[in-house]
Image (spheres, rainbow, N blue to C red):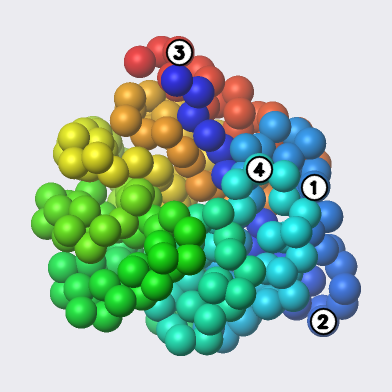
C-alpha cells in the first residue's frame, strides 16, 4: 500500500511572520507541494499564532485538493475555527507557549475528561480526529476509547536516537502501529523525519500516512519545494519496497 505524504507548511509561514510580509505564502507553498505529489497539507494553528494564521486555515481549506489536516490544541478558539472551516482531519496535539515545536505526544490518558467532549464535537461535525501520541500502549488504548479515528505516532525520539537506541525506538513504533491497527485505528506518523531516516518508518506495514514539514521546507531552501517533495516521496517508496 502506498504511504500518503502530507506536507506541513508551517515553516513557510514562520519565514513570512519573521518579516511581517505577505510572502512567502503557505498557500502558494501548498500548491507547489501538491503539484509535486503530496497527498495532503498539514498546518498547526498554535494558540499564539506564531506562524500559521486563521486566514491561512480558511484559504487552505478552500484550495487544498487532497487532504487538509489541521493540527491544534483543544483550546476553545481553535476548536471553534475547526468547526467553522471543517478540515478533513483534525490532529489534536499538546502545546506549550515556551516550546519551539511540539515536544512529545499528547497525554490521552490523563486528559480524557478534556479531550472526550472535544473529540465528540469534531466528529459530530464530520471531521476525522487524530491524536498525536507516543507509541505507548496506554496512550493508544486511551485514543481508541476516546473515539479517535486515527493516531499519529510521535517519531521524535526515533529521529533523535543513535546506536542501539535507534533500533529500540523503531521497534517501539512498529509495536505501537501494530497495536493501534489491531484496535481499528488508522496509523500515521511524524516529527523529525528526514530523507535520511524516513525509510524505516515508511516500511512499517500499518503506517499509512506520514506528516513531514521542517525537513522538506529546509531542503526546499536549497533545492526547491518540488524537488524536496519528490526526494521525500522517493525515500518513502524505497522504505516501503525494502520491507
Query: Which tag is nearer the camera, tag 3 or tag 1?
Result: 1
From the viewer's side, name the closer residue of 183 and 122. Answer: 122
* Residue mark closest to the camera, 1 vs 4: 4
Residue picked out by circle 2: 20
**Percent position (x, y) of residue 34?**
73, 40
State left or right for residue 43 relative to residue 35: left
- Rendering coords of residue 154 (x, y %): 34, 52
Identify the residue position indicated by label 1 in the image.
Answer: 31
Q: Residue 241: which numbered mark, if any?
A: 3
Dot 4 or dot 3, earlier in sequence: 4
- The answer to whether residue 234 is visible is yes
Q: Nearer the viewer, residue 19 or 179?
A: 179
Look at mark 4 in the image and give the residue it sits on: 66
| C-alpha distance separating marks 3 and 1 | 28 Å
Quadrant of residue 231 within the rendered picture? top right
Badge 2 density bin: few <14, some 14–19, many ≥20, Cα 10 Å? few
Alpha carbon separation for disc pair 2 and 3: 43 Å
- The first of marks 3 and 1 along the sequence is 1
Q: Position of residue 78 (x, y in %)?
A: 52, 79
Residue shown at the point (54%, 73%) measured from the top left: 83
Q: Earlier in the sequence, mark 2 or mark 3?
A: 2
Q: CA distance from mark 4 to mark 3?
A: 24 Å
**SS class, disc 1:** helix
Amino acid at each position: 500500500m502506498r504511504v500518503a505524504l502530507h506536507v506541513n507548511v508551517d515553516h513557510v509561514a514562520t519565514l513570512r511572520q519573521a518579516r511581517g510580509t505577505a510572502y512567502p505564502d503557505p498557500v502558494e507553498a501548498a500548491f507547489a507541494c501538491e503539484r509535486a505529489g503530496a497527498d495532503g497539507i498539514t498546518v498547526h494553528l498554535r494558540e499564539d499564532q506564531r506562524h500559521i494564521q486563521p486566514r491561512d486555515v480558511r484559504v487552505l481549506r478552500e484550495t487544498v485538493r487532497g487532504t487538509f489536516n489541521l493540527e491544534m490544541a483543544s483550546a476553545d478558539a481553535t476548536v471553534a475555527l475547526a468547526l467553522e472551516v471543517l478540515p478533513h482531519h483534525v490532529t489534536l496535539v499538546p502545546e506549550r507557549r515556551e516550546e519551539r515545536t511540539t515536544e512529545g505526544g499528547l497525554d490521552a490518558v490523563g486528559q480524557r475528561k478534556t479531550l472526550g467532549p472535544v473529540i465528540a464535537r469534531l466528529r459530530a461535525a464530520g471531521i476525522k480526529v487524530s491524536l498525536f501520541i507516543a507509541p505507548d500502549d496506554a496512550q493508544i488504548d486511551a485514543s481508541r476509547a476516546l473515539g479517535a479515528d486515527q493516531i499519529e505516532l510521535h517519531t521524535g525520539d526515533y529521529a533523535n536516537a543513535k546506536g542501539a537506541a535507534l533500533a529500540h525506538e523503531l521497534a517501539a513504533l512498529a509495536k505501537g502501529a501494530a497495536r493501534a491497527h489491531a484496535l481499528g485505528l488508522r496509523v500515521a506518523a511524524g516529527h523529525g523525519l528526514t530523507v535520511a531516516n524516513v525509510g524505516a518508518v515508511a516500511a512499517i506495514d500499518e503506517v499509512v500516512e506520514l506528516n513531514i514539514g521542517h525537513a522538506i521546507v529546509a531542503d526546499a531552501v536549497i533545492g526547491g519545494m518540488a524537488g524536496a517533495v519528490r526526494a521525500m516521496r522517493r525515500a518513502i517508496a524505497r522504505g516501503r519496497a525494502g520491507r
